[in-house]
Amino acid sequence: MSEVKTASISIRMMVSSKVRDYAQLVKFRLTTLVLFSSVIGFLMAGSNWEWPQMLLLILGGFLTTASANALNQVIEKDFDRLMKRTAQRPLPTERMSMAEALLAAGIFGVAGITIFWIYFNQLAALFSAVALLSYAFIYTPLKRFSPVAVFVGAIPGALPPLIGWVSATGMLSPVAFALFSIQFMWQFPHFWAIAWVGYDDYMRAGYKLLPSKDGRSKFSALQIMFYILVLIPVSLVPAWLGMSGLVSALIVLICGLVFLTQSVFLIRQGSIEAAKKLMFGSFFYLPIVQLAIYFDRIW
């Protein structure tokens, strides 16, 4: 009995370890944020949805995003070894083989895009494929050569709400482009705040993400502030289009001003601590703005 119990415990530990490895491979928390944006886009499209549709959207979005993130880690395996925050991922530590990661990425990607193709529409499947391929094979390798990578990566990063909208309607619209534009502009201060905090780590791997060649410079901080200044009116476009009302416009404006204030502190202080506050502010900004627009729209 003791041998059976020991074997059972061993199996559970192996399964638990493998689950943790896959959670790291697919970047589970990042994938959850992506899914949130897709769901918001889907809900914005109208009230005539059913739970099976929602679950399929979440599953398709999760699998497609998981594939992109897994391919990202396959491509960056050797560089991940050089950074403290990524050195313990399953591929650099060889807890998972490249073959396993590639197989998982392939299965996830094909399954996710197939779900969009069969259960939603071809346009949703197309945008999902574009997001996956551009993130994995254009943005990922470009990170080591030019800060332009952030602009390229902002495109697949902004597609989730548009994919959600198209999944529900089968067509594009000004509302879909408004949601895309908000998420597109938000990514610049978001990514650059992260790049500021992790600058030393990124430099070890040769990643060039901050907009200034001098890295943590006043120019980089000014660029962050500039894009927040653009983000504020872009985030007010839904109210201007009449897809939401004054309540959400006020919330969006307040969030934008708080975000802008954090960027001003970064310009003045130029510190990692100020960048961390901006980074966390970016995590809160997007979901609050999206939820405000959504609830104002349905009320």
Image (cartoon, rainbow, N blue to C red):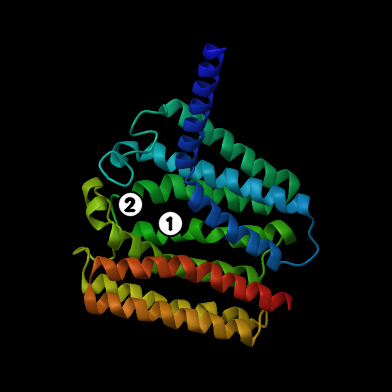
Is the N terminus in the top left, top right, bottom left or bottom right quadrant?
top right
Of residue 118 and residue 189, the one placed in the foreground of this image is: 189
| Residue wearing tag 1 | 153
User: Vertical placement of 225 versus 36: above or below?
Assistant: below
* Residue 273 point in image, percent of width and height: 28, 67
| Mark 1 or 2, nearer chain start | 2
Residue 24 lies, in percent from the top left, at 45, 41
The amino acid at mark 1 is: Gly
Please tell me the numbered disc located at residue 240.
none
* Residue 188 appears in the figure: no
Q: 10 Å neighbourhood of mark 1: few (<14), some, or many (≥20)? A: many
- Secondary structure of the residue carrying tag 1 is helix
Give yes or no for contact between labels 1 and 2 (Cβ–Cβ under 8 Å). Answer: yes
Q: Name the residue furthest front.
A: 2
**Left of 110 or right of it: where is 184?**
left
Crowd around label 2: few <14 · some 14–19 · many ≥20 (10 Å): some
Residue ID for mark 2: 143
Q: Is residue 107 left or right of residue 206?
A: right
Q: Residue at x 49, y 41 (%)?
A: 23
Picture quadrant where residue 114 is located: top right
Residue at figure coordinates x 53%, y 80% from the top left = 252
